[in-house]
Image (cartoon, rainbow, N blue to C red):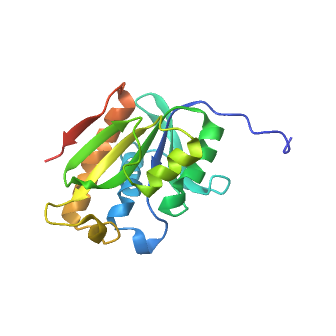
């Protein structure tokens, strides 16, 4: 019956790509989380994203490396991403959460996998920590800064095609995260 609570679905991974909704932000550095998880969805031939109004997100469900996953693109602005992440966590009861986002403190072509760490000032990550009341998730942090760039100058500007090219490689690393047991933080250079 419609008034009964929805039964929880058990999945291996909830993967949350961070970004801002709308065409205005589609090519910005801040939206690399959206694009990376979209590359994963495309590469693995998972179902197209569908709008899920109860999660206020775009969602795709499927299997990668034999593990059930849900990919989530919150349709809130970055600093409210935790609202969608909390609702998805409550519905899907994932074993692990991976949050994919830009990191202006990291140099271009650098990925840092962080396990159970703070937000380091990233407002989208802090929103997730606040709403889940936990830091117990994995972060795939994607470096977006060249040596001479200042962080505040790049997050909301369109990325060059050179910078967006690393997102495809980051999607490959994301797939590796799904198939491995992560217990500590590490860094990967993509070039």
Residue at the location (37% across, 24% down)?
181
Quarter of the image where the N terminus is located: top right
In this rendering, the answer to whether 36 lies above or below 181 is: below
Along the line of sight, which residue is nearer the eye, 120 or 70?
Answer: 120
Residue 112 occupies quadrant: top left
**Residue at screen point 30% across, 68% down:** 152
- Percent x, y of residue 19: 44, 60
Q: Which residue is farthest bottom?
A: 24
Q: Position of residue 144 (x, y in %)?
A: 25, 58
Spot occupied by residue 164 in the image (x, y as percentages of width and height): 26, 60
Q: Is residue 97 visible?
A: yes
Residue nearer the viewer, 90 or 129: 129
Q: Which residue is drawn at 33% across and 55% down?
A: 102
Can residue 48 be seen here? The reply is no
How many numbered callouts? 0
* Relative horizontal placement of residue 99, taking residue 59 as reference (left or right): left
Q: In which quarter of the image is residue 145?
A: bottom left
At x 26%, y 54%, the residue is 105
- In this image, 46 relative to 166: left or right? right
């Amino acid at each position: 019956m419609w008034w009964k609570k929805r039964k929880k679905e058990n999945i291996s991974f909830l993967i949350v790509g961070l970004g801002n909704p709308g065409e205005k932000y589609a090519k910005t550095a801040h939206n690399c989380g959206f694009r990376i998880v979209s590359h994963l969805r495309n590469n693995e031939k998972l179902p197209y994203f569908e709008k899920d109004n109860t999660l206020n997100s775009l969602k795709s469900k499927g299997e990668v490396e034999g593990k059930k996953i849900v990919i989530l693109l919150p349709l809130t602005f970055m600093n409210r991403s935790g609202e969608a992440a909390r609702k998805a966590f409550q519905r899907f009861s994932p074993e692990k959460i991976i949050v994919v986002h830009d990191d202006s403190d990291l140099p271009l072509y650098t990925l840092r996998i962080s396990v159970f760490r703070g937000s380091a000032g990233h407002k989208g990550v802090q929103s997730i920590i606040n709403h889940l009341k936990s830091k117990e998730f994995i972060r795939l942090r994607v470096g977006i800064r060249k040596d001479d760039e200042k962080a505040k100058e790049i997050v909301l500007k369109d990325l060059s095609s050179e910078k967006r090219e690393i997102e495809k490689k980051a999607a490959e690393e994301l797939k590796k995260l799904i198939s491995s047991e992560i217990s500590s933080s590490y860094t990967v250079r993509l070039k």
